[in-house]
Amino acid sequence: MEPVCRFITEELAALMGVERVSVWFFNDRQDELHLQDLFRLSCGTHEQGAVLHQTAFANEFHHLLTSCYVDAHEPYTDPRTQGYVEPYLKPNGITSMLDVVVRQGEELLGLICMEHVGRSHFWQESEILLAGQLGDQLSLTCAMRELKRREAELRGLNAELEQRVQVRSQELQTARMSLAATEQAAALSSMLSQVAHELATPIGNALLAAGTLQGDALRLHRQLEQGQLGRRALLQFFDDQQHAASLVERSLQMASERLHALKRFSADSASDQRRCFELRRSVLDLIELLRPALERHPVLLQWKVEIDPGLQLDSRPGQLGQALVNLINNALVHAFEGRTHGCLRISARLLGATQLRLSVADDGCGIAPADHARVFEPWVTSKAGRGGTGQGLPIVRQIVERQLGGLIHLESALGAGTTFHLDLPLRAP
């Protein structure tokens, strides 16, 4: 298990930005924890061999044996970790620790420990979930040679994606000099960075599963050579292989969907050329790219896309996507203040043989009628001094009228939500 543990500690430390990540295993009596590998991020070193005895940490062992995890945000006062303070926490400068217990069925195997140094840290649910997933993968021991090829391929895709994000961000920051263009570039750069971060989880899951699969294949091969391979072990091998392969398949499918949506959107954003495209597909791709930001939004949002699958446009999908990004961001910033949930709806319908109406609606707080005429003016914002610049809607109006050859108008009332209608020609000028 040594190479698998080294791989997990290094990848988790880099992904989460944690100074100390370690893997511990229980002995057979479950009264000792043995350090398999400790990785220090700042110096890139590994350590092994430390032992924690239950006799010295009875209360702490009890919490580990009876819990799925111990999230000690303040370990010096947390009753679950107070026994570690003098012999372990203080000498190592540890200020926050998260222990995730690793099980295989009902059997306790050990734990994955993440420790912040120098500053206190509140463990988020996503961090606990990720560490738990890694614990599940640590308990899997299967391998296939084909996954080594996929590992290299995924690394290449990840590097390519990061390069595209960097290049795109630089182009957007240097290509426009005005404040309006700078805000537009920042919005797109943020979205791509969020997608890159979102891809890290499925890609990391697949890579870790590949490593555990390889380790188990070596173990099974040694058992076979030594004549110790029994029916039970072989059946367990096949069962673990199916679970690991299923995890890899789901992770690759998720990464593939995100990557294909990103490639389509990036290609369109990089060019203002007109082309034929399916409107519903473009809108769904955009929502998929914005999903990381939407899921982290404090308001619980419901999405509705009401666009016929066969509706085609001969227009500029990149410019249209940028306009929709600004409208969605405008709703997220302004529409749901003081609310716990809300709904966003994007719909489209034909207006005769040469035009359609694309609508972006929310059920939020609405806009006073007296302000309708001013919302598309530069510098007008209700968030002055709180991050708003008043450039989002003027950018949308400029794109719709100058790039797409259409018109935009507003329907809203206080307490009744807001709808922006984009009347667009089916064939852009």
Image (cartoon, rainbow, N blue to C red):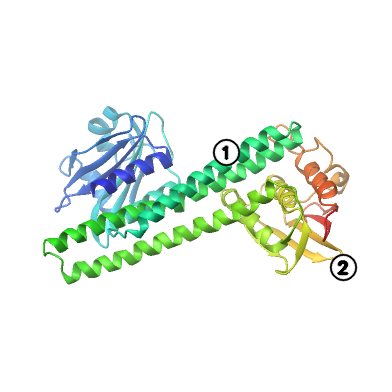
| Left or right: where 89 falls relative to 274 | left
Residue 266 can be seen in this image: yes
Q: Is residue 363 left or right of residue 118?
A: right
Q: Residue at x 39, y 64 (%)?
A: 246
N-terminal-most mark, 2 or 1: 1
Instruction: Check disc 1 and report the residue beneath it.
Output: 166
Q: Secondary structure at mark 2?
A: loop
| Rendered view: 11 above or below 308 | above
Identify which amino acid the numbered label 2 is placed on.
Ala
State the residue in front, 222 or 97: 222
Other-residue count near label 1 (Cα within 10 Å), few / some / many at <14 / 14–19 / ≥20:
some
Q: Return the x and y of residue 106 as percentages of the image width and height.
A: 25, 62
Numbered-mark total: 2
Q: Which residue is mark 2?
A: 353
> Residue 249 shows which numbered tag?
none
Amino acid identity at mark 1: Gln
In the image, 275 versus 387, the foreground residue is: 275
